[in-house]
Amino acid sequence: MLTSASASTQTTILPTARTTISMASWGALPKAFGRVHPRNLTPSFSTVMMGAVSIVWTVALLLSFLAHQHPRDSITGLGFAILFYYGFTGLACVVYYRRELFKSARRAIFVGLVPLAGFGGMAYIFVKSFITVSKAGYNYSPPLLGIQLPIVIGIGGLLLGLVFMVMQWIYMPDFFKRKLQTADPAILEEHLDHVTT
């Protein structure tokens, strides 16, 4: 149980800390999220903040009136966020390498077709999951204001993220003024074109 708890803690805090430090380095979040511990060389502020958010969320679930049911629906709801960011990562790959896609069949497949298929697959599962968890009686917890709890958690979390993004756009607009980037062709020449099949 201790090993499982430790692994769960790491998978909750570490990816979000890495994401927020990366976003801070690009100016998409306040600079405080980009702080690195001088001795451990790890994201300090991001780790503490993401850990605190995780603790608050877990305690809120455990203290709620259906504590034995909420964690299951919370996990289902978090799947929407995972599908969202993995899917858009595939789409971002296609956009980032758009000028390289048709220079060879290998490039078209590995940086065009495969990531685009990943995006399509994640979008399909997102929609299919939404339809499935929308059904009455499917979830562990009763609906909240007529909306199934995984949707409240998953889609609600994405909408909350949209609110934060708009706030960033207003108060830190430089990140959103950047030009659409394209990949350096040397990246594919080094890592893709020289790979033998």
Image (cartoon, helix red, strand yellow):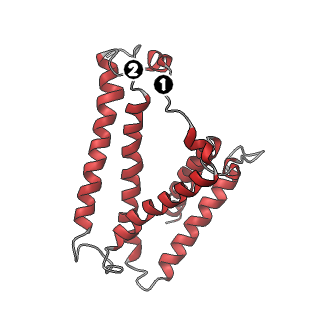
Which residue position holds label 1?
183
The quadrant in which residue 167 appears is bottom right
Percent across and percent down for residue 113 are 29, 30
Left/right placement of residue 41 relative to residue 61 reads right
Q: CA distance from mark 2 to mark 1?
A: 8 Å
Left/right placement of residue 138 relative to residue 190 reads left
In the image shown, does 68 or 186 lie closer to the viewer? 186
10 Å neighbourhood of mark 2: few (<14), some, or many (≥20)? some
Q: Are marks 2 and 1 in contact (CB under 8 Å)?
A: yes
Which residue position holds label 2?
100
Residue pictured at 64% horizontal, 42% vertical: 25
Percent across and percent down for residue 27 are 63, 44
Left/right placement of residue 4 relative to residue 32 reads left
Residue pictured at 22% horizontal, 64% vertical: 132
Q: Give the answer, above or below, for where 33 lies relative to 185.
A: below
Q: Give the answer, above or below, for where 115 lies relative to 13.
A: above
